[in-house]
Amino acid sequence: MDIWKFYDITHREHVVCNPMSEEKLTRLVELLRLPTGDPSLTAELHRAEDGRRFVAFAGRSASSPQILPRPLRLTGLDPAARYEMRLANPEDAPPQSRGPVALKAGPVTLTGSALMAAGLTLPVAWPATMWVIEGRTL
């Protein structure tokens, strides 16, 4: 059997053929820590190699000492590009709220400069929960 035909059959559904080495993963996805200003919130952004897509994770480990949530400022984006973002897990949003949050209602479109300067307000999160935000360049 032709080895390339074998690889085509066995890895047809794979984006990247396994095994995945740490070096290969580092080349494909860039991991960026996000400053939160809140000790109970840990956030990071995984950006695709071409910079056109990203996934941001924001996990709350405990109750926040702050009364109002701070916007999550993203980093490593193209300031001139426009990004469409949506919650990947909107079903996890609790009914409680501190006011309307655009991201909870549906996709939001902002420029990279706005996301890096002003940030993105996340819905209310209770301890031991995580928001997953998917973004793509328009």
Image: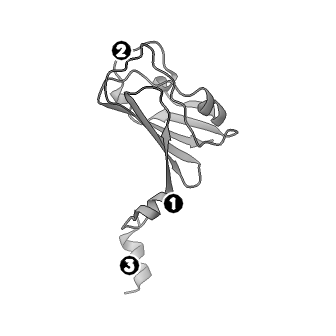
Q: Amino acid at mark 1?
A: Arg
* Foreground: disc 1 or disc 3: 1
Where in the figure is residue 50, as x and y percent of width and height?
Answer: 59, 54
Would you call the spot at circle 3 few (<14 residues within 10 Å), some (14-19), or many (20 or more)? few
Q: Quadrant of the C terminus?
A: top right
Q: Is residue 15 visible?
A: no
Q: Mark 1 and mark 3: span between their CA atoms?
A: 26 Å
Using the numbered discs, state the Cα–Cα distance from disc 2 to disc 3 in whole angstroms: 53 Å
Marking on residue 27: 1
Pointer 2 and pointer 3: residues touching (CB < 8 Å)? no
Residue 103 in sight from this viewpoint = yes
Disc nearer the start of the sequence (2/3)? 3
Give the residue type that dot 2 points to: Gln
**Location of residue 53 with respect to 95 vertically, above or below:** below
The three-letter amino acid code for the residue at tag 3 is Phe
Dot 2 alpha-carbon crowd within 10 angstroms: few under 14, some 14 to 19, many 20 or more: few
Task: Name the residue carrying label 2.
Answer: 96
Which residue is label 3 attached to?
6
Q: Secondary structure at mark 1?
A: helix
